[in-house]
Image: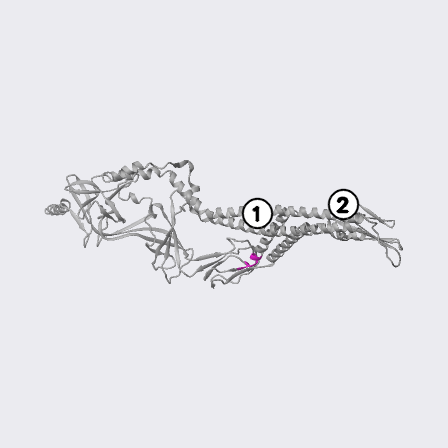
């Protein structure tokens, strides 16, 4: 019993010797096959957890959650409103490009076409009537009344003849040959004036078509230029108050002369001086480019102006021709009346009794002649015809143009009653039924067809990570419908901020490689994009790297002294970071100073080595060749 305390003492001394071996020396953990060496060492300046820079492999990734969708998906709707007549397809049905998906009832569209056609016919008739009014002055505005009195019966009848006929024959009927010759000359003037009106009408209608065509071409060219010309858009975006004079060439010349001594000092001020303003020469260049791009539009507008002036000239010529015709017709009416009143105005029939005939022109006021004691009033020959002007003709032409456009639209709409599939694929959704009233271009009454050319994932990446993403980078995709890991590549990167928060985010599309696995539109997907991957490069544990703004440093332990060294990074992993400059293989870097107190939960440090990842969706991973995790052994 007395020896038991001695045994306890020996056991305690043995344990102390074991601990002394651990604490008194240095524990070195080296990755099998080379790589980063982790160690805990003690020196006079304190106790550090360190690692040795060595060759390794670093993989940097960006992870995000996205939505699966067919690469080609089309939701189509009718381009004209109406009532759905048939829907011959169902969800899940395979269709070909051009196959009918639905049709509309044509009754309303046919009624619209009939109404537009009727409006066009009315407009054409109005033009014809107005043109006739300009040439019918010789037959309606001046008429004569022939009164024939049968002396045996005592009855009289009246008939009307035009002014030109009266001018030709009135004098002969009255026995006045001299007056008849004068009116024959007036009839020739009326005929020529009427021909001039017809020619002026044809010239006006032809010029109207030319001017209208020129205006359409000018309008179309202007719309196209406004829609596609980026130069003019940039010019309109320039703030006039921010335009500055061009910098003088003297400073730039001296900077180039002194490029060997201070190349960086002269290079940096130049962009910063113009970063918040626009140089005058830049604005002038934009003006020149915009003017050149709109030169075609300017030429077409000039042509339109010329044709409009020609149309105005044709209108003036028509009005003058109509006025000349009315004047000639008035002269014919006057000559006709002179010839009929110069003689007795009566002839006698040789059989059955005495008959007398008197021919007199009517005017806008009542007039009368007598024959053989009989009187007849010519008030019934009064004319009230309205003569159209050139402006009326142009208005009629415009009405016809508008009516023809309505007919064209109605005819085109009638051809839109069949909804067809734009692609070959599978019907994914049918959002309409027979009897439904649909509107043109509806976003709800649609039929969706998904294509057969694969799937893609649409996801958003935060600003802090999207700059590392590039088109062509590989990705792995996980979806709920299969346990198979899918692969893909980045196919596009958006440039517009799609975030509804203060943190900018941008759309990234990942095209999924061809697969036989069943995928569903709208399902979620976990995507990991490999943005950087390097093998056999100089690496250190990520926790050894400190980031302060744009400055990246590593603490190096040499001869018991710790010094801060500026470094440059390559690929950044969760465990390892590639060092491209500032360190050499074998350098000992400090992971932690064990003599310093641990930071509390409320404290943050810019130099933790992980601060550069805060607020970012980037996830990185590092693999040491056969290596040990960069965090070191437990408790380090």
Q: Residue at x 76, y 45 (%)?
A: 364
At label 1, counting other C-alpha atoms closer than 10 Å, the crowd grade (few under 14, some 14-19, many 20 or more) is some
- Residue 604 visible in rendering: no
Q: Secondary structure at mark 2?
A: loop
Residue 221 place in picture, x, y as percent: 49, 49
Which circle's residue, 2 or 1, is located before the other in the chain?
A: 1
Where 490 falls versus 272 (above or below)?
A: below
Asked whether 360 or 133 is in front, the reply is 360
Q: Secondary structure at mark 1?
A: helix
Asked whether 9 or 475 is in front, the reply is 475
Q: Which residue is mark 2?
A: 364
Asked whether 444 or 192 is in front, the reply is 192
Can residue 109 be found in the magenta stretch? no
Q: CA distance from mark 2 to mark 1?
A: 37 Å
Count every numbered label the image shows and give the total. Answer: 2
Q: Which mark is residue 310?
A: 1
At label 2, counting other C-alpha atoms closer than 10 Å, the crowd grade (few under 14, some 14-19, many 20 or more) is some
Would residue 71 be found to the left or right of residue 583 on screen? right
Asked whether 1 or 37 is in front, the reply is 37
- Residue 484 visible in rendering: yes
Residue range (magenta): 411-418
């Amino acid at each position: 019993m007395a020896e038991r305390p001695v045994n306890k003492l020996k056991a305690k001394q043995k344990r102390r010797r074991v601990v002394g071996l651990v604490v008194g020396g240095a524990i070195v953990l080296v990755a099998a096959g080379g790589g980063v060496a982790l160690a805990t060492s003690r020196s006079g300046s304190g106790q550090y957890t360190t690692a040795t820079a060595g060759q390794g492999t670093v993989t940097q990734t960006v992870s995000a959650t996205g939505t699966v969708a067919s690469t080609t998906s089309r939701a189509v709707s009718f381009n004209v409103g109406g009532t759905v007549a048939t829907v011959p397809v169902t969800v899940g049905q395979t269709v070909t490009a051009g196959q009918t998906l639905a049709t509309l009832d044509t009754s309303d569209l046919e009624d619209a076409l009939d109404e537009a056609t009727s409006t066009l016919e009315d407009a054409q008739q109005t033009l014809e009537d107005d043109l006739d009014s300009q040439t019918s002055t010789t037959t309606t505005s001046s008429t004569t009344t022939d009164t024939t009195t049968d002396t045996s019966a005592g009855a009289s009848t009246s008939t009307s003849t035009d002014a030109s006929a009266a001018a030709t024959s009135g004098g002969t009927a009255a026995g006045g040959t001299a007056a008849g010759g004068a009116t024959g000359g007036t009839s020739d003037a009326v005929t020529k004036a009427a021909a001039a009106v017809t020619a002026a009408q044809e010239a006006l209608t032809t010029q109207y078509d030319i001017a209208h065509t020129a205006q359409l071409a000018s309008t179309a060219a202007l719309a196209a230029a406004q829609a596609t010309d980026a130069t003019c858009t940039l010019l309109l975006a320039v703030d006039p108050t921010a335009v500055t004079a061009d910098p003088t060439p003297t400073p730039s010349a001296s900077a180039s002369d002194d490029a060997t001594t201070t190349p960086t000092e002269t290079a940096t001020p130049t962009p910063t001086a113009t970063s918040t303003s626009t140089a005058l020469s830049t604005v002038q260049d934009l003006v020149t480019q915009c003017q050149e791009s709109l030169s075609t539009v300017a030429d077409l507008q000039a042509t339109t102006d010329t044709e409009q002036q020609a149309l105005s000239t044709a209108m003036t010529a028509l009005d003058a021709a109509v006025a000349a015709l009315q004047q000639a017709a008035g002269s014919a009416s006057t000559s006709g009346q002179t010839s009929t009143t110069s003689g007795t105005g009566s002839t006698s029939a040789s059989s059955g009794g005495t008959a007398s005939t008197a021919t007199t022109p009517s005017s806008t006021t009542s007039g009368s002649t007598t024959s053989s004691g009989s009187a007849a009033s010519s008030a019934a020959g009064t004319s009230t015809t309205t003569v159209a002007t050139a402006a009326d003709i142009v208005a009629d032409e415009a009405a016809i143009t508008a009516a023809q456009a309505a007919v064209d639209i109605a005819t085109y709409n009638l051809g839109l009653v069949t909804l067809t599939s734009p692609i070959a694929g599978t019907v994914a959704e049918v959002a309409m039924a027979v009897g439904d009233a649909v509107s043109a271009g509806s976003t709800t009454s649609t039929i969706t067809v998904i294509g057969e050319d694969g799937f893609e994932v649409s996801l958003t990446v935060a600003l802090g990570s999207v700059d590392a993403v590039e088109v062509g980078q590989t990705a792995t995709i996980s979806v709920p419908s299969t346990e198979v890991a899918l692969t893909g590549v980045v196919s596009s990167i958006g440039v517009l901020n799609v975030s509804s928060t203060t943190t900018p985010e941008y759309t990234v599309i990942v095209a999924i490689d061809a697969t036989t696995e069943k995928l569903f539109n709208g399902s979620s997907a976990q995507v990991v994009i490999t943005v950087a991957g390097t093998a056999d490069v100089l690496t250190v544990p990520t926790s050894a790297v400190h980031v302060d703004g744009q400055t990246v440093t590593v603490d190096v332990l040499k001869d018991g002294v710790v010094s801060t060294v500026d470094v440059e990074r390559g690929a950044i992993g969760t465990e390892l970071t590639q060092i491209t400059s500032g360190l050499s293989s074998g350098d000992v870097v400090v992971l932690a100073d064990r003599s310093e107190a641990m930071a509390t939960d409320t404290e943050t440090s810019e130099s933790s080595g992980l601060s550069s990842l805060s607020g970012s969706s980037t996830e990185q991973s590092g693999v040491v060749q056969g290596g040990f995790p960069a965090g070191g052994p437990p408790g380090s």
